[in-house]
Amino acid sequence: MLRRLGQQPAREPSKRSTSVDTCVDRIRESIVRGESPAGSALPPERVLATQLGVNRTTLRAAIQRLTEAGLLEAQQGRGTFVRDFQATAGVDVLGAVAHRFRNDAAMIAGSLDPASLGKDLLLVRRCLARAVLESLVEVPPGPEAIEAVRLALVDLEVAVATRATTATLASADMGVVGAIVAATGRPALRLCMNPVVRTLTELPSLQAAIYADPAENVRAFSAFLLFLAAPRAELVEPIVQSMAERDADTLSRLMRLGHLDRRVQGDS
């Protein structure tokens, strides 16, 4: 870890990033990529601060943030140790670093390659979607909630019609999903759904696969508006099955994109 953190190339910070944000990103990347394995100790504070080019106050704030996120653990009298993030952190830890790497496969340690990660995240999304649908059947949404979904869908339709960037499409798509989950009136469902959807739309190869045909997203959401107007239990399974079929198409595109990327890399 001493060598790797010290040798990582500098990256262009966002306009809103702070020294603490940058420090958090550097350490988190090292952990998620497997360069700082679970159980390993961070270097002494003074040494690590020098490696990262920050002062010790900044480093302490970053370590505190990573500890709260489940990536690090401070042990009295021994130091700070890396935790097994797959056992202790949330899925959003992947989305937090995804946008910083053009090569998804290099980002993630172990078996979490983009294809298997995408498959698992899409499965989790469908499970959460089922919970959302059942909640809407139990307590149908009011007119204001339905209108909020409709307006969010209009934003997505505009993004598709104007051939917006993939990032803009992803943001509009997340807006529709957020409005649908908010219609349940159950904050826990939205808090569970947010990191899953965010991670799906931040991984570059997954984003390209999901929005290869954005008009299909519009059609699916338009059909869902009919369900919102009159939620019925017998419609839940067909909707989830339809999601599963679209997810299968997404994974097929993802595999093709991955194959193409490998060919391009091999030719370069």
Image: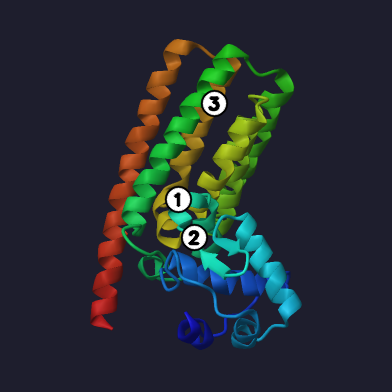
Q: Position of residue 104 (x, y in %)?
A: 40, 65
- Calculate the distance from the C-alpha at mark 1 to the C-alpha at mark 2: 8 Å
Which structural element holds mark 2?
loop
Mark 3 or mark 1: which is in front?
Answer: 1
- Residue indicated by mark 2: 83
Q: Position of residue 8 (x, y in %)?
A: 50, 84
User: Which residue is at 55% across, 39% downward?
Assistant: 193
Residue 222 in sight from this viewpoint: yes
Sequence-first disc among 3 and 1: 1
- Residue indicated by mark 1: 87
Which structural element holds mark 1?
helix
Pointer 3 local density, CA inside 10 Å: few below 14, some 14–19, many at least 20? many
- Residue indicated by mark 3: 132
In the image, is residue 42 above or below residue 191? below
Foreground pick, 226 / 76: 76
Check if mark 1's residue and mark 2's residue have beta carbons within 8 Å. yes
Q: How many marks?
A: 3
Quarter of the picture containing the C terminus is bottom left
